[in-house]
């Protein structure tokens, strides 16, 4: 089995697929190898596009996240047009209910408004009685990440990307160059390689990316014509993400348990208790689904983007809690890097920050 494409991408989550689409649109031929499409974190996520609600510290990471959020509307139009699949992108804003007034001292701005007790209960009827106020982030948004991942795969296929459901067992090197990748079906070769294997990246290359498990569940609104929530609720230790099809996603635990699978009673109990505290009427809705996933975490919680120790291998991994948000900007910056154009932001996410 050989590949004669210009670029070979290992990993078919949102990051690998978004890069594949972008490279193909720039006329490069692309192969994507994916071990398990459905096991990707991209299917497990909540789909929040939430640089502000996540309170990312000002600096390069916030700049990257805000840039990506601003790219989202046009990027989604493009992906939906090519794939013919709707992604559930929803510029719904995020409300961050609080049980204390501790952080209301920050200034209000156009993209961040503090709501006092009366105002927040007016903006979102049905909040728990203990909510005393909260921030409203009108620019934060959401996308149905499962639909997005399927749309990206369909878009990549429609554009002629060669997607193969096969695991890479090892990367083959000669000095500082990648010469191929080994799979059960033989070796594949290409001019350029991109590593986009999320939480599993460390299995192929010694870089510090490790899994942080997140458990999730969803409930179903009884009457889809009357959605009780029209905005994301992002409270301490819990978020509640209403989809336009009537599902409400509730997440998420953050657990250091390696790749241990399954939902646990403790995880589910914590999610349900916190969620019902913020929005009590959830307790009556039918449970729809439980699942879990593995966030690709790095020691400083920032992604690893751009160059690698090998001259023809580019890294696009470690997106931790924000990989859905960061998909469009990652696709752009990595496609630029493949064309030897390096955006100044990339230097902040270089792998060498972990080399001692
Ligand atoms: C519970 C949870 C909630 C989240 N919520 C949000 C959110 O609200 N907003 C947000 O922006 N982000 C969120 N995230 C984070 C986001 O999901 C990830 O950062 C993002 O999906 C990472 O994408 P990825 O393509 O790098 O990795 P993945 O989606 O994990 O994809 C990696 C792919 O590589 C494949 N692969 C791995 N090893 C190999 C190999 N050897 N050979 C071939 N293929 C291989 C895997 O099978 C998989 O298909 C959440 C994550 C979790 C788990």
Image: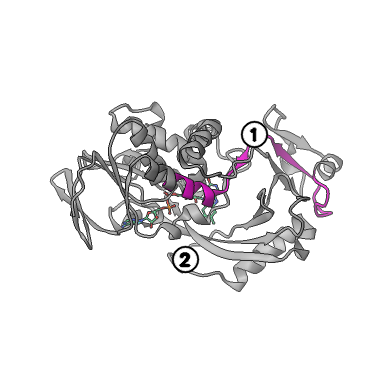
Asked if residue 331 is positioned above or below residue 261 in the image, the reply reads above
With 152 as the anchor, is 223 left or right in this view?
right
Residue 67: in magenta span? no
Asked if residue 252 is positioned above or below residue 3 in the image, the reply reads below
- Where residue 113 appears, as percent x and y from the top left, is 73, 33
- Location of residue 222 (image quadrant): bottom right
- Where residue 280 appears, as percent x and y from the top left, is 79, 59
Stretch in magenta:
124-153
- Where residue 314 appears, as percent x and y from the top left, is 29, 41
Q: Is residue 301 visible?
A: yes
At 38% from the left and 35% from the top, the residue drawn is: 22
Task: Give me the C-alpha separation between circle 1 and circle 2.
Answer: 34 Å
Front residue of this view, candidates 275 and 220: 220
Q: Is residue 356 visible?
A: no
> Around disc 1, counting alpha carbons within 10 Å, would you say few (fewer than 14), some (14 to 19), or many (20 or more)?
many
Q: Which residue is mark 1?
A: 139
Q: At numbered mark 1, what does the secondary structure look like: helix, strand or loop?
A: loop
Asked if residue 36 is positioned above or below residue 101 in the image, the reply reads below
Asked if residue 187 is positioned above or below residue 155 in the image, the reply reads below
> What quarter of the picture does the C terminus occupy?
top left
At 82% from the left and 39% from the top, the residue drawn is: 116
- Location of residue 7 (image quadrant): top left
> What quarter of the picture does the N terminus occupy?
bottom left
At 82% from the left and 53% from the top, the residue drawn is: 130
């Amino acid at each position: 089995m050989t590949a004669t494409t210009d670029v070979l991408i290992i990993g078919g989550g949102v990051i690998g697929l978004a890069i594949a689409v972008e490279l193909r649109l720039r006329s490069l031929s692309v192969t994507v190898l994916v071990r398990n499409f459905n096991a990707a974190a991209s299917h497990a996520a909540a789909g929040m596009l939430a640089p502000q609600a996540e309170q990312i510290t000002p600096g390069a990471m916030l700049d990257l996240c805000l840039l990506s959020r601003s790219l989202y509307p046009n990027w989604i139009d493009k992906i939906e047009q090519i794939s013919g699949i709707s992604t559930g992108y929803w510029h719904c804003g995020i409300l961050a209910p609080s049980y204390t007034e501790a952080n209301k001292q920050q200034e209000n701005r156009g993209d961040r408004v503090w709501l006092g007790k009366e105002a927040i209960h007016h903006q979102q009827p049905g909040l728990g009685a203990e909510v005393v106020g909260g921030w409203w982030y009108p620019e934060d948004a959401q996308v149905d990440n499962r639909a997005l991942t399927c749309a990206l795969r369909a878009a990549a296929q429609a554009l002629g990307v060669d997607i193969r459901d096969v695991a890479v067992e090892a990367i083959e090197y000669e000095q500082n160059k990648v010469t191929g990748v080994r799979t059960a079906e033989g070796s594949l070769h290409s001019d350029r390689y991109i590593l986009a294997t999320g939480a599993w990246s460390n299995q192929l290359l010694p870089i510090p990316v490790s899994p942080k498990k997140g458990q999730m569940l969803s409930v179903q609104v009884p009457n889809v014509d009357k959605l009780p929530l029209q905005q994301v609720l992002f409270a301490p230790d819990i978020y509640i993400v209403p989809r336009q099809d009537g599902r409400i996603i509730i997440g998420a635990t953050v657990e250091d348990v390696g790749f241990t699978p399954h939902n646990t009673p403790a995880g589910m109990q914590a999610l349900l208790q916190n969620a019902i505290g913020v929005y009590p009427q959830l307790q009556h809705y039918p449970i729809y689904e439980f699942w879990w996933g593995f966030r690709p975490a790095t020691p400083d919680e920032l992604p690893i983007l751009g160059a690698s120790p090998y001259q023809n291998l580019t890294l696009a991994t470690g997106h931790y809690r924000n990989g859905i948000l960061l998909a469009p900007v990652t696709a752009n910056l990595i496609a630029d890097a493949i064309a030897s154009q390096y955006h100044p932001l990339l230097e902040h996410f270089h792998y060498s920050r972990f080399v001692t």
